[in-house]
Image (cartoon, rainbow, N blue to C red):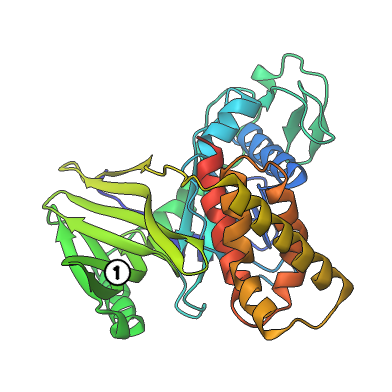
Amino acid sequence: MTDMINKRLLIKHLLAHNDENSFYDKKRKIDIGQKEGKAKFLKHICALSNSNPKNNSYIVIGVEDEDNTIVGVDFFDDSKIQNLINAYLTHPPIVQYENIPFPHLPDDKVVGLVTIRPTGKLTSLRKNIWKYYGGSVFFRDGSISMPKVFESDIVDVNSKIVEAIEKNAQNNIEHTLDGVMDFMKKRKDYNAQYKVFKEYFVVCWAGQKKIIKKETFYSRVDIELINEQVRLFFSALDEVSITITDDTFEIIEYVNLGFQKNHKYYPLEETVINFQDNASYTIETKLLFEPPQFNKKTLYHMYNSNNALLEKLKKGVTLTENETVDLNNLPSTYLICYLNDFENAIDKLQEAKPFLKTQNNGVYLLYKEAMRILRKVKYN
């Protein structure tokens, strides 16, 4: 498989087919953390898969519906999205979620690209979710709630168009060189470098280097596979250790958790990108996280003061200086409480979201970070 698709180019070609066709859909954002968002996402996957038995279909995320403006979404690193699809759909398609950087977007934004591979079989909802019933079959122009024999009726109308679009989005040396230059320029403050694997794959990466007890860590790490214009890894906050061999690029991500002055780094996840001789690559992730256990009495105290703080936010009370400091710890404190069996801590954290969003002291970024860690941990 030497023909690599330049995903940024692919997105531009898809958006040029102005109306959403039956082979692609565009979304401002998706939210698979909530029941409703999850259900709608599964419905879109199901409909696109059924309407395209012989070709890939796509969802582009981070685009304004009216005028196709590319606004971007947060980097989303969920290696378990396939598990969700397998759990809810019969004849589940293989689905890939990738983060595609665009030069005009801010550092922390990308366009999400969901690729749905054809199965040639009818996909239906395996069980009830939100207001959709198990057994429902969705197509691009509506739904059919009674499964019956459709297999022979699915018409292949898109494969020629999609084939042409994919062909026009093939990568070449010029795109690759442009991509490297873009990256080096944009990331010059973060020790940007490139490495070629297997004489074929060009990986650019950057990060702020720091040495702690003779070990090297990086923060603000950004890793891109230039051949495909895919961002493989991005972290605004965490410490990351990086190991590079001739065939692999390995990242171990650490998260900083604790109370007040008593913080510690815990390994969260290991990601290994393997480059093969046949011009293909795989990405494997392994969760390493062991939730830190704390004294229950301390936790009750922290939990209750968090709740009191949340009530003040809801009532619009002006916070004292000390309370503002405590507010910064609120996301990670709720997260630690949840990891120590305070089941309701996550509901509380989600309740706080709209109030944290209006603060201008970076606490909303900490909220997003806590939810990201939670998403990784919850699946396991």
Q: Which residue is drawn at 83% across and 25% down?
A: 145
- Give the image location of residue 4, x and y in percent: 32, 53
Extreme residue toward the right, this view: 315
Q: Nearer the viewer, residue 43 or 243?
A: 243
**90 displayed left or right of 133:** left
- Give the image location of residue 198, x and y in percent: 13, 52
- Give the image location of residue 220, x and y in percent: 38, 72
Q: Nearer the viewer, residue 264 or 66?
A: 264
Q: Residue at x 56, y 52 (%)?
A: 336
Q: Which of 198 and 349 is in front in this view?
A: 349
Q: Name the residue under label 1.
A: 218
Name the quarter where the N terminus is drawn. Answer: top left
Up the image or down, 127 lies above or below 331; here it is above
Q: Which of 57 and 361 is in front in this view?
A: 361
Q: Is residue 72 shown to the viewer in this render? A: no
Number of numbered callouts drawn: 1
Q: Residue at x 45, y 64 (%)?
A: 262
Up the image or down, 130 lies above or below 144; here it is below
- Secondary structure, mark 1, is strand
Tell me if mark 1 has few (under 14), some (14-19) or many (20+) residues whose alpha carbon lies within 10 angstroms of its own.
Answer: many
**206 displayed left or right of 308:** left
**287 displayed left or right of 104:** left
The amino acid beneath tag 1 is: Tyr
- Give the image location of residue 227, x and y in percent: 30, 60
Q: Residue at x 74, y 63 (%)?
A: 352
